[in-house]
Image (cartoon, rainbow, N blue to C red):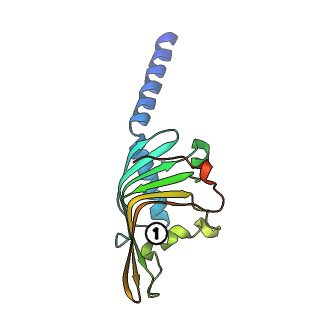
């Protein structure tokens, strides 16, 4: 009798772990959408296509009340322990379209401005290194639309050296 219960418990635990593994992308998707919604960010579309121990791939991203940010693909590199604390090593973006308002009539990022502010009054976290490919920035200025096309570009902040970057390939 005791052996049967142990086998049943082991089977149920195995099934639970398999279900959790199978639904991991959906679970991460829900967590991301929930965290963004808590900051007042409208998520138009987001699909976590792949998640691993050191990298996550998001496809079809659209954020903002007026789709101020859209991206065909994001590859987010991280260390598992750092991800729990909200730290990311690099972000590689394919097909970014970012709409900015530099007229002074509204916040530059529109409804996405909260992304640059810290959570719960804390100081904002530093941005990770960002690699962009096939991207464009549409900046509305007092003189009209300024379009910046990025065929391949890299953005670093002072805390990251070039050699420390992980390369994401598209």
User: Is residue 97 visible in the rendered structure shown here?
Assistant: no
Q: Please indicate whether residue 1 sits to the left or right of residue 137 in the image.
A: right
Q: Who is closer to the viewer here, 61 or 137? A: 137
Q: Of 22 and 59, which appears nearest the observer?
A: 59
Q: Residue at x 46, y 62 (%)?
A: 36
Q: Is residue 100 above or below residue 71?
A: below
Picture coordinates of residue 166 (x, y %)? 54, 46
Question: Looking at the rendering, which quadrant does residue 11 occupy?
Answer: top left
Q: How many numbered marks does the figure carry?
A: 1
Dividing the picture into quadrants, the one containing residue 27 is top left
- Coordinates of residue 2 in the picture (x, y in percent): 52, 12
Residue at 34% over, 73% down: 66
Q: Is residue 125 visible?
A: yes
- Residue 75 percent across, percent down from the top left: 44, 50
Within-10-Å neighbours for mark 1: few <14, some 14–19, many 20+: some
The answer to whether 15 is drawn above or below residue 84 in the figure is above
Image coords of residue 99 (percent x, y): 39, 73
Residue ID for mark 1: 40
Instruction: Write down the quadrant of residue 109 in the picture.
Output: bottom left
Residue in the image at 54% along x and 69% along y: 116
40 left or right, relative to 71:
right
SS at mark 1?
loop
Q: Nearer the viewer, residue 17 or 112?
A: 112
| Above or below, 151 relative to 105 | above
Name the residue located 47 percent from the left edge and 47 percent from the top edge: 168
Vertical comparison of 92 with 5: above or below: below
């Amino acid at each position: 009798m005791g052996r049967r219960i142990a086998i049943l418990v082991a089977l149920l635990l195995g099934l639970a772990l398999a279900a959790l593994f199978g639904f991991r992308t959906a679970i991460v998707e829900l967590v991301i959408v929930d965290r963004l919604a808590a900051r007042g960010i409208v998520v138009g579309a987001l699909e976590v296509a792949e998640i691993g121990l050191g990298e996550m791939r998001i496809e079809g991203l659209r954020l903002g009340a007026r789709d101020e940010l859209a991206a065909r693909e994001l590859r987010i590199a991280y260390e598992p322990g750092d991800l729990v604390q909200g730290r990311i090593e690099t972000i590689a973006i394919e097909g970014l379209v970012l709409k900015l308002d530099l007229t002074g009539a509204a916040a530059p990022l529109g409804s996405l401005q909260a992304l640059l502010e810290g959570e719960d009054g804390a100081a904002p976290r530093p941005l990770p290194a960002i690699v962009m490919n096939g991207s464009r920035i549409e900046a509305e200025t007092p003189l009209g639309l300024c379009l910046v096309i990025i065929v391949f570009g890299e953005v670093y902040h002072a805390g990251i050296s070039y050699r420390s970057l992980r390369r994401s390939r598209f």
